Image: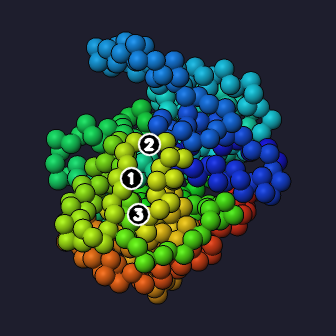
């Protein structure tokens, strides 16, 4: 079968591609590479002209400031349009979300209609910000969410432009159109499954695929300094609660100066990011989550101890009795207490790291997960 995967924000589609190839399917990934992360794609719609040259970028920024027109969005749409002749004869297409082309909604609908004329079997993946997700979060029925900082301080609206855009009329229209024209909606973790179902949508829950054959497990050695890694993406800094980690690390550095090494990176390509955190015992991911995102899962597969979402809904769903990950709360004292315990009890790092790998092998094996996708797609 020929499969088209449209969009990439976390390496999810690349891992799914690897699973599909293992099962002897032909796969093409079309995406922008997600800016500085530079994920692998087969056909790129990266807005190279308006983002790669500093003098062109200055002109683009001036036009955006004076007219609100984003020329990068238009360039991505144009690049995708000229790719359309190559995107025929596929048995299935999956969109990473409703903004998979990263363009204006009216252009996205035009391009989706063109694409769908030649591909009858389609699915929409919900693995991040999306219209029903944001609608549900505004109900404030969860004890916290990525919008908690915004609810606490509405002056942060500009920093929440990306999630809030999905509640606007134009993005809502695109999502609704896709729901009508895709045969299946798929949620990749509990942070999306719970809101989608609460908003009345039928979704298939398929956890993120992790290629355990490519990710080497290494038992943590604790006879040296404990290395703690924090990778910062400025675009999601507030909604991931990075400031809580930074404050906790300041305390930990002073408290355990001779026992820890702290590595902090900011806005670096995916491959460089992986190289940096390979040395780490502990990876700090995010605090406003109930389940693990793709970044956390890859680190868990390597045997790292990850601070991220692991709420009661997560442990109950997977029937866990021992910790495979640390539930990171938006509370500095809690983070300091958890980090202090691990630094003072290094054998627990090794134990959690081993359980994390076993969990990934059991629940996120990319071949089994891929087979689940094929079942939903009915291929």
Residue at image x 75%, y 54%?
20
Give 10 or 113, whichever is nearer the viewer: 10
Residue 253: percent from left, percent from top: 23, 65
**Residue under pointer 1:** 231
Label 3 Cα neighbours within 10 Å, binned few <14 / some 14-19 / many ≥20: many
Give 248 or 64, whichever is nearer the viewer: 248
Residue at image x 70%, y 67%?
368
Residue 69 against residue 363 in the figure, above or below: above
Residue 322: percent from left, percent from top: 46, 85
Q: Secondary structure at mark 2?
A: loop
Label 1 Cα neighbours within 10 Å, binned few <14 / some 14-19 / many ≥20: many
Task: Tell me which label, 1 or 3, sits earlier in the chain.
Answer: 1
Residue at image x 31%, y 82%?
344
Residue 179: percent from left, percent from top: 55, 45
Task: Tell me which label, 3 or 2, sits earlier in the chain.
Answer: 2
Can residue 20 be seen in the rendering of this structure? yes
């Amino acid at each position: 079968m020929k499969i088209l995967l449209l969009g990439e924000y976390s390496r999810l589609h690349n891992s799914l591609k690897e699973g599909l190839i293992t099962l002897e399917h032909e796969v093409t990934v079309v995406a922008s590479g997600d800016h500085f992360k530079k994920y692998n794609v087969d056909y790129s719609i990266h807005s190279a002209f308006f983002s790669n040259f500093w003098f062109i970028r200055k002109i683009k920024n001036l036009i955006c400031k004076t007219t609100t027109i984003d020329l990068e969005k238009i360039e991505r749409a144009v690049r995708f349009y000229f790719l359309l002749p190559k995107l025929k004869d596929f048995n299935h297409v999956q969109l990473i979300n409703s903004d998979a082309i990263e363009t204006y909604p009216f252009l996205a609908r035009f391009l989706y209609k063109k694409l769908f004329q030649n591909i009858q079997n389609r699915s929409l993946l919900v693995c991040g910000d999306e219209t029903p997700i944001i609608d549900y979060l505004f109900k404030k029925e969860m004890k916290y969410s990525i919008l908690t900082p915004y609810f606490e301080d509405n002056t942060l609206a500009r920093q929440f432009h990306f999630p809030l855009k999905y509640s606007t009329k134009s993005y809502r229209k695109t999502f609704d159109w896709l729901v009508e024209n895709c045969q299946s909606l798929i949620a990749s973790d509990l942070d999306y499954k719970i809101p989608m179902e609460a908003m009345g949508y039928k979704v298939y829950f398929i956890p993120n695929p992790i290629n355990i054959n490519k990710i080497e497990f290494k038992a943590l050695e604790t006879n040296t300094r404990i290395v703690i890694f924090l990778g910062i993406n400025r675009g999601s800094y507030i909604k991931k609660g990075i400031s809580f980690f930074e404050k906790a690390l300041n305390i930990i550095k002073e408290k355990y100066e001779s026992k820890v090494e702290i590595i902090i990176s900011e806005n670096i390509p995916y491959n460089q990011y992986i190289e940096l955190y390979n040395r780490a015992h502990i990876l700090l991911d995010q605090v406003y989550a109930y389940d693990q995102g793709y970044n956390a899962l890859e680190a868990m597969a390597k045997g790292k101890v990850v601070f991220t979402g692991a709420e009661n809904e997560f442990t109950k769903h997977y029937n866990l009795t021992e910790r495979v990950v640390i539930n990171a709360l938006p509370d500095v004292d809690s983070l300091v207490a958890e980090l202090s315990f691990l630094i003072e009890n290094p054998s627990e790092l090794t134990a959690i790291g081993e359980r994390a790998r076993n969990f990934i092998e059991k629940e996120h094996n990319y071949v089994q997960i891929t087979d689940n996708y094929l079942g939903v797609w009915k291929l």
